[in-house]
Amino acid sequence: MAQLFHKSANNIAKASIVGAIVLAGVAGFAYTVIARSSYLTGRYIERQQPVQFSHRHHVGDDGIDCRYCHTTVETTASAGMPPTQTCMNCHSQIWNDSPYLEPVRASYRENKPIKWERVHDLPEFVYFNHSIHVNKGIGCSSCHGDVANMASVYQENTLQMEWCIACHKDPQSNLRPKSEIFNTAFDPSTLSEDEQKKLKEDYKIRSREMLTSCSMCHR
Amino acid sequence: MLKSKLLWILTFSLLITAGCRYDMQDQPRYKVYKSSDWFQDGRASRELPEGTVPRGFLRDNKALYTGKIEGVTATAQTNEQGQQITFPDVVSEFPMPVTQEVLDKGEQKFKVYCSLCHGAFGNGDGMIVRRGFPKPPSYNDDRLRNAPVGHFFDVATNGWGKMQGYASQVSVADRWAIVAYIRALQISQNPNKTATTAPTTGKTEEKPVATPTPAPANTNTNVAPKPSNTNSNVKTTNVTNTAAKPTKTGGNK
């Protein structure tokens, strides 16, 4: 009986082993790229909101503090979404006939909340508390970016676990003084190492082991 | 043979991914601000039934929680036209001790919630006023300088004129802290006139009253209160010199 395969098939077999390894490597790399892509994480994607609300105008131009609307950020897990009443504090008087604000006035008239499109949405198996971060030296912009310059808010970071953990492993380089927490233009990396160390002591930041234990976030 | 095996593996793995669900990401429970199909107005967060009091929220200290006292017509003054200005039914003393911590907190909260309209010095020239909101009266005129503290608390709580109430945005303790800070502002802006109702309570440890630090020139003040480097000359009761420039410092940028 004649041979089924030609001699050169040996080479093909060898090459296919190498090829398989390379392919697996490429596939693995592609997976990490795709998993971190904004297609899956939602990073940098601007959402259409029912009202054309601009943080750049309200925070950047007008100088309104984050806490004016997100009132509970220092005290509770949720930063707090402002009720329509908060909009009307000013917009009952200014821009009160603008067509852009009709959804706000309608919400106020009919006592129906505005349905904002959620931008930052953590999976619900993660416990996250705004107040502890804000009170321990993590500024808004460390996670949310320079919101004072965002016309429509987008997600600045991946919000993936590796991103959370990166900071929980090394919180020191992300700390800022109490006075700069709500300053979205502040860059914590401008602080010297000594200043960072001092902040870490002052805020009584817990050990790396503590901060990276599973039950810190999955509780 | 090999081909069909591969095909099987592919279909099988596809089937597995089709089974992927997001039950853990989006769990069937209500979190803050979630919507609900169950309730007619679509809100998962419910309002308290009328007449119920949550444990620990019995607010029976009326002076503290409303700034009011019935039947007491507090401090009456006469204005330039000789008319009597009265503030009926409000308390004229702080219902809690005024300490440096309270004033510091008041300063912080004032800058967040009040200075937008009332201006950094309470002259009514804040950014929102410059944007077209009706100008509020200055804290530094005689009427408000002599108004009892309960009046300020009541206004912060329930609003006044074009101003809406801030009860939902600012807690009771913070509102009182703001009132204490307003008093400090008034004293600092009128160094030569003695405020008739400086912050006093029976229990107060008489700590020195801080003068507000002038607002830095940019409008970012409210976003990022810089640590004041003027503090050295600030923590004294003698405010005569520190506040020589009364008006407009926060405005006209």
Image (spheres, coloured by chain):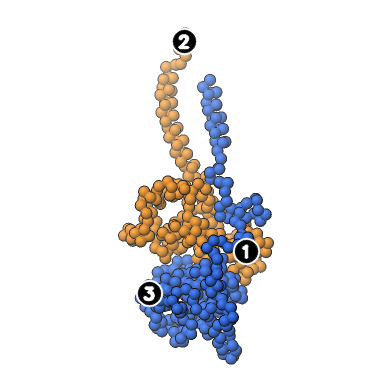
Q: Label 1 is placed on what type of residue?
A: Gly
| Chain A tint as drawn | orange
In the rendered structure, the answer to whether residue B238 lies left or right of residue B122 reads left
In the rendered structure, the answer to whether residue A104 lies left or right of residue B144 reads right
User: Do circles 3 and 2 both sit on a common chain?
Assistant: no
Q: Residue furthest top?
A: A1
Question: Disc 3 sits on a residue from what chain?
Answer: B
Marking on residue B51: 1
Q: Quick one: B238 or A41, which is closer to the camera?
A: B238
Residue hosting label 3: B231
The chain coloured blue is B
Residue B9 is situated, as x and y percent measured from the top left of the image, at: 53, 28
Q: CA distance from mark 1 to mark 3?
A: 48 Å
Question: Disc 2 sits on a residue from what chain?
Answer: A
In the rendered structure, the answer to whether residue B187 lies left or right of residue A152 reads left
Residue hosting label 2: A2
* Whether residue B90 is visible: yes
